[in-house]
Image: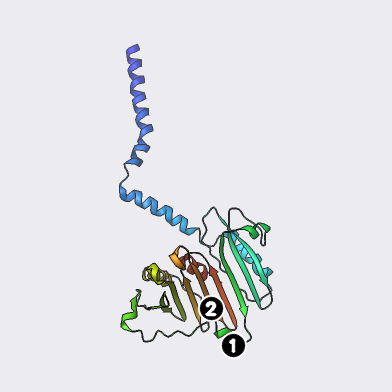
């Protein structure tokens, strides 16, 4: 009888041990493609945090109610993770202009919170200005003609878009048009930055995401200073006699994402 009881206990322990090891072994034996898919899904979730969130929407509604300028516009998406927040500081608030700086924060903060005065994680500054002199307004949009590009300057950016690449005074320029928008990437020639690759990624993004439609002119400038270890981007467009400007130190795709989200 003791032998039978011992055998039963031994068999039960083997079965229990096999069950406890099963999930760990199955995870370690996942095919490489399945592991890659899991990583891809994780990356997708991270990207989704740039979408509008209810708390962000509420904050934007509050900012709109505080602005004196009628028919105001604001970016609605920002490059933050799901554990981060956006803080807003109103720098200027008049009936004909406003300026707001947006910061990355680790916890929710109220609009114009004092902590933003010492926050170094600036996401972007968004401005609107009403012009009463058309000439002053037009000066913000240098005339750029890309109708006849010399063959040696042509750059294929995909999606049937041709850019123009030229050098001047130690700088390299790559320009192209997106509807009424002119896009320019500037870098230091000696850095030999692959601006063509950057431009193609921007063109790919804009193929799926539409920029605001300017009444006449829109301009995007991406500037890489010496060594190209940082970037400064600016998007500017006009609607009537109002000019909207977004300035950021984020990478070009993030600059485009914030600009595209403006409403």
Which mark is drawn over residue 134?
1
Which one is nearer the viewer's eye here, 136 or 262?
136
The quadrant the N terminus occupies is: top left
Could you say where residue 217 lies in the image, as x and y percent from the top left? 51, 82
Residue nearest the observer in this picture, 170 or 240: 170
Within 10 Å of disc 1 (Cα), the crowding (few <14, some 14-19, many 20+) is few
Using the rendered view, name the quadrant where residue 131 is placed: bottom right
- Where 242 sits versus 202, above or below? below
Residue 17 lies, in percent from the top left, at 36, 28
SS at circle 1:
helix
Does residue 119 sit above or below 25 in this rendering? below
Residue found 55% across the figure and 71% down from its top:
246
Q: Residue furthest top?
A: 1
Horizontally, residue 80 falls left or right of residue 187, namely: right
Q: In the rendered structure, find residue 237 and report the number of the disc placed on it.
A: 2
Q: Quadrant of residue 64?
A: bottom right
Seen from the viewer's position, the closer of residues 204 and 57 is 204
């Amino acid at each position: 009888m003791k032998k039978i009881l011992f055998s039963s206990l031994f068999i039960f322990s083997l079965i229990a041990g096999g069950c406890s090891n099963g999930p760990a072994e199955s995870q370690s034996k996942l095919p490489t493609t399945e592991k890659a898919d899991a990583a891809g899904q994780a990356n997708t979730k991270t990207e989704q945090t740039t979408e509008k969130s209810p708390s962000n929407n509420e904050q934007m509604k509050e900012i709109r109610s505080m602005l004196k300028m009628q028919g105001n516009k604001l970016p609605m998406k920002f490059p933050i993770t799901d554990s981060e927040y956006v803080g807003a500081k109103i720098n200027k608030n008049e009936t004909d202009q406003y300026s707001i700086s947006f910061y990355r924060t680790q916890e929710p903060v109220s609009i114009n919170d004092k902590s933003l005065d010492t926050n170094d994680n600036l996401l972007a500054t968004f401005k609107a200005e009403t012009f009463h002199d058309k000439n002053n307004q037009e000066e913000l949009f240098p005339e750029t003609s890309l109708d006849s590009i010399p063959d040696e300057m042509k750059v294929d950016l995909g999606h049937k878009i041709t850019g123009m690449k030229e050098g001047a005074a130690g700088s390299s320029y790559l320009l192209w048009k997106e509807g009424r928008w002119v896009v320019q990437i500037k870098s230091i020639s000696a850095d030999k930055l692959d601006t063509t690759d950057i431009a193609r990624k921007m063109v790919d993004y804009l193929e799926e995401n539409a920029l605001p439609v300017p009444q006449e002119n829109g301009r995007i400038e991406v500037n890489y200073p010496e060594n190209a270890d940082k970037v400064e981007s600016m998007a500017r467009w006009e609607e009537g006699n109002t000019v909207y400007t977004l300035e950021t130190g984020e990478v070009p795709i993030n600059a485009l994402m914030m600009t595209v989200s403006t409403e």
